[in-house]
Amino acid sequence: MKGDLEIEIVVIGSPVEETYNVSCMLNQVLILCTSIPYTSPSTKDAAVELIDKLIRLELDLVFLMIWTVILGNLVGTILGMLVANPLARVTFLRGSLLVPVLLSVILTGSFVVHSSWFDMIVALVFGLLGYVMKNLDYSRPAFIIGFVLGLMVERNLFLSVKLYGNTFFLQPLALGLMAVTILVLVYNVHRLLRRR
């Protein structure tokens, strides 16, 4: 294809000449690397083989990618430190100025990811839920933490049931963690009741 970078390589010890398309190789490496945790050992071996080829044949490209990540992080850190104070002053603006700007950015961002109106509706519903939780004095950070960590808890619960059966919570470590959790809850509830 026009514009594709092709490199001719002679494999050491072999008279056969092979042509590699670097962009195709990079795509294969990225696809295989992102699916490694969920794939079979043969796919992992294929990813390792592709990465090995890329390092042997295009070492300068590998170093270019590494240095790009390093310099990008460095520039991002420096810019973040320079812009932190001016951005912190934005919090002192009136809500009537901030809300329209933030709402348009949030809705645009939610639409752009999948070009789906449904994502915008989900963003609005969660915004409304946050507003209701604020008015009813519910803890929004606790809700967000639970929402984010819920998937991890579900996975680990499934893993525990698979490894130890339905009585996994009778293991000494699980009993100890449950005891600590109950003690902390009882202490906090007792302290709240004493304040009232």
Image (spheres, rainbow, N blue to C red):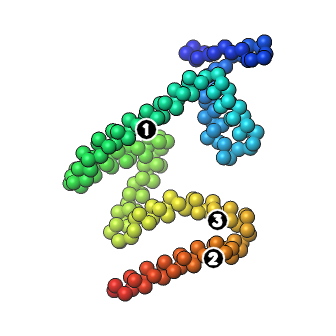
**Marks 1,2: beta carbons within 8 A:** no
Q: Which mark is residue 73?
A: 1
Q: Which quadrant is the C terminus positioned in?
A: bottom left
Q: Amino acid at mark 3?
A: Leu
Q: CA distance from mark 1 to mark 2?
A: 43 Å
Q: Is residue 44 depicted above or below 190 in this figure?
A: above
**Marks 3,2: beta carbons within 8 A:** no
Secondary structure of the residue carrying tag 3 is helix
Tally of marks: 3
Q: Is residue 17 depicted above or below 115 in this figure?
A: above
Indicate which disc, 3 or 1, sits on the residue closer to the N terminus: 1
Q: Is residue 47 depicted above or below 191 in this figure?
A: above
Image coordinates of residue 194 in percent, x first then y, are 37, 87
Q: Quadrant of residue 15?
A: top right
Which residue bears the numbered disc 2? Answer: 175
Name the one closer to the observer, 31 or 52: 52
Secondary structure of the residue carrying tag 2 is helix
Q: Amino acid at mark 2?
A: Leu
**Could you tell whether 50 is left or right of 191 in the image?**
right
Q: Is residue 96 visible?
A: no
Residue beneath the point at 72% across and 14% down: 10
Which residue bears the numbered disc 3? Answer: 157
